[in-house]
Image (cartoon, coloured by chain):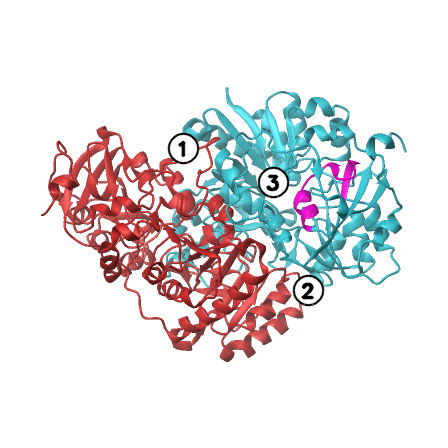
Chain colours: A red, B cyan
Amino acid sequence: MTDADDRIADGVPVTDAATAADAVEPDDVVLVSGFGGVGYPKRVPEALAADDRDLSLTVISGGGVGGEIDDELVEAGQMARRYPFQTRSVSRAAINDREVEFHDRHISRFGDEVRLGDFGDPGVAVIEAVAVGEDWLIPSTSIGHMPSFVAAADRLVVEVNETQPRLLEHVHDVYLRDLPPNRDPIPLEEPIGRVGSPKLEFDPEKLVAVVETDRPDDPYDFREPTEADTTIADNLRTFLEAELKRNPTLQEQICLQFGVGSLGNALMGALSEIEFADREVIYFGEVFQDGLLDAIDEGMLSGASATSLALSLEGQERLFDDIERYADDVVLRPADVSNNPALIDQFGVVGVNSAVDIDLYGNANATHIGGTRIVNGIGGGGDFNRNCRLGIIALPSTAAGGDISRVVPSVPHVDHTEHDHSVVVTEYGVADLRGASPAERMGAIIDVAHPDFRADLREYRERALENRGHVPVSADSEFR
Amino acid sequence: MTDADDRIADGVPVTDAATAADAVEPDDVVLVSGFGGVGYPKRVPEALAADDRDLSLTVISGGGVGGEIDDELVEAGQMARRYPFQTRSVSRAAINDREVEFHDRHISRFGDEVRLGDFGDPGVAVIEAVAVGEDWLIPSTSIGHMPSFVAAADRLVVEVNETQPRLLEHVHDVYLRDLPPNRDPIPLEEPIGRVGSPKLEFDPEKLVAVVETDRPDDPYDFREPTEADTTIADNLRTFLEAELKRNPTLQEQICLQFGVGSLGNALMGALSEIEFADREVIYFGEVFQDGLLDAIDEGMLSGASATSLALSLEGQERLFDDIERYADDVVLRPADVSNNPALIDQFGVVGVNSAVDIDLYGNANATHIGGTRIVNGIGGGGDFNRNCRLGIIALPSTAAGGDISRVVPSVPHVDHTEHDHSVVVTEYGVADLRGASPAERMGAIIDVAHPDFRADLREYRERALENRGHVPVSADSEFR
């Protein structure tokens, strides 16, 4: 390995992954770094999967992590519990088979909850870094809840990843909040400001092992934008351009956020087609995806704040090759800062998040297919949807190649309520729900459903309107 | 009328209610003061109800108001739309009959939404005050969204209520936030601190009429605590005493919030039975109800912050008689401060809110009976449930004299999701849901259901557990 001397400070002993894994107790609560599929530890989880001992671990991450954790530990039967988000087919199947107990929480509040023992007594934090000293480390490609996790855990294991540039330190703004009561607000005055440090400092007594790795992240692959994605982006553009004209909070600056995933990435990529006039355009979200690289390069985006460089491997390469330049405009924060309700509100963010399905009243299911099988988790969707100046749900009108309507009379699981977001966008248009009563919402939302399903939805609405009630419902629906 | 000179500054012309009503256009968006059934204008709404013109008003309040608005305007057919909360049987019936269009929003965000025109272009604000000058007024028994409403409206009508003490000015802390982007956090550093002024200042050009009234508020009547209320309070006490011992955020101070209503009032009244040891106990909520008066008098509560003195008439009399003493410990704020997500988080509030029903997964319906007929509105329940350090849902296990279980397999309307609150309390115990997976939650919640319904709920759970899925569900349920 190259430049190890720059990575690991003198006097910090390095060990192998199997030895580091010995620091993990069989029923430990293990807090791992990682968010958006990047910045997670690789070697130690792999060693835990291969461990001779019969482990029953609780694994807690900030967001999505790679296969070394959510495939290998699950397949080895070493993971008993998992919080609060996952993105892998192996862990998803185990959770849906209830072989692994799982519950998902709002990202913004999760760091506090872990520190206060809501998910068990935190034992060991396993953290990926690009450099480490006796009492500090520099995070790698995501921060997530790393500061809270390191503060909460009794022991700390650090994996130093030498495939990632040490210069990532230039993008980090590490900050740890005090716990309540009467804690200060986060003193961030503008979306791309900084309030912390490039380094995460820790109690040197906690450091039990340092391991080296040269394995790259295994991040999401984004599919190419579909025709539906492109049409949704067009509809969103038309809506935003009208809103920019009328909304007094958007006259000088607009902060945008897009949810994780291929649709979010496609929407980010379509930003450059929007007529923002002289406004400053800033991304203030949870993940920095490939779609934003062009917007930064073109200068149309003056900055981006996130908690994860959730880039494809190609995107990572592009960013790593030019990290110092990107670091002028890109800042990574802890997830309880990137997703903080107060900051989302102060900056007046316009947030665009997706859903599995949405009902005629505006309730959105973002997590469970059929109300039962989990997809990934709620992530930051609730943080942004509720606290944004303008919360937008964007989703294709159908699933399963057009066989299933994503617009349904009643969603089988509710993650975002009718009280939260304001606008729904599909490839068939925009339903602006602001000020609309449930009966009015039904009409507006049916108008953006796929034409093949509108007649049935209208029939449902007619039947519902025969009944009394502020929220018109009908017991008989072919949709459920 | 007495002491009018102290109430209405020299040079401010006074008119009668009918003349003031002329300032309201037939299809105006009318923003009225009032929250928790107090501090709402009486004479001008009554004059609008009696107006010869055919009106089609949009009426927007902060929270609950009295019969002059939600009975008389509705019965006269002068109200077309209503936001975001109501508590009267007449308005409730009209909304459920869809004669009045209605939609409810989270209180904390509503002031901004009104200012930005989400519910139409604000025309006139009709505000109750205890005193008025050319460019200022002193609110009466509630603040609610008064600052946002006065800022948003083109015209201002003030009703001066001489039955309420002018000394109410000592309890008020009026503060208007800037709009986004990049607005400051609310600079409140401790729950009973002050950041504003006793007076609300306004552009004198807006003031079109001042009317006098000597009519008292028509606030809620609280029923006497039922046996179920008392048992719920006991269970909450046992839980809180254990939590006080273990939770590091509660060692020196506890901020409590209780939802509006008779159960909330009963819980407030039972506060003095809790062993808080040396902790400072503070109320940081939305409404100040009768149950808190004893706690203040006994000195067990060191202060109370709210947006409404939602007292019974007897409670008002008790407070008014001793207003200067109470003003040392009681502060009224705008609803977007009292319910602010950032402040609820900073102070580490423990919030207790009720629900119509709750399901086995922890989702709560707080607004719609049978998912269709509205009760009051969501109010601040979502603000507190989601942003509290510890969000607690407290509800009796049954309704309709024991015939109906409030614990159901699946709530027919979701206001608070499984991701929000942490604990459920009924008269049969406490379900601590922290860290519990859906399958585990089902068991814990069934244990606090009424014994008469547990067998059926357990049968439902068994059937659900036969199916695959992170959230175990069964299509067949006798409950829906």
Whether residue B275 can be seen here: no
B64 relative to A180 in the view: left or right? right
Position of residue A156 measured from the top left corner of the image (x, y, whole percent): 23, 36
Instruction: Look at the image and say whether residue B137 sits in the magenta stretch.
Output: yes
Span highlighted in magenta in the image: B127-152
Chain ID of residue with mark 3: B
According to the image, label 1 marks what residue?
Answer: A178
Please tell me which residue is depicted at 40% across the width and 40% down the height of the picture.
A113
Q: Secondary structure at mark 1?
A: loop
The answer to whether B471 is drawn above or below residue B294 in the figure is below
Task: Count neighbours of disc 3 (C-alpha within 10 A) and say few if under 14, some if 14 to 19, many if 20 or more.
Answer: many
Residue occupying the point 77% across, 41% down:
B128
Q: Nearer the viewer, residue A380 or B402?
A: A380
In terms of secondary structure, where does tag 2 sit?
loop
Specify the label residue A468 is tagged with: 2
* Residue B140 on image: x %, y %: 75, 36
Instruction: Pick the residue in front: A438 or B371.
Output: A438
- Judging by the rendered image, the residue that carries numbered circle 3 is B259
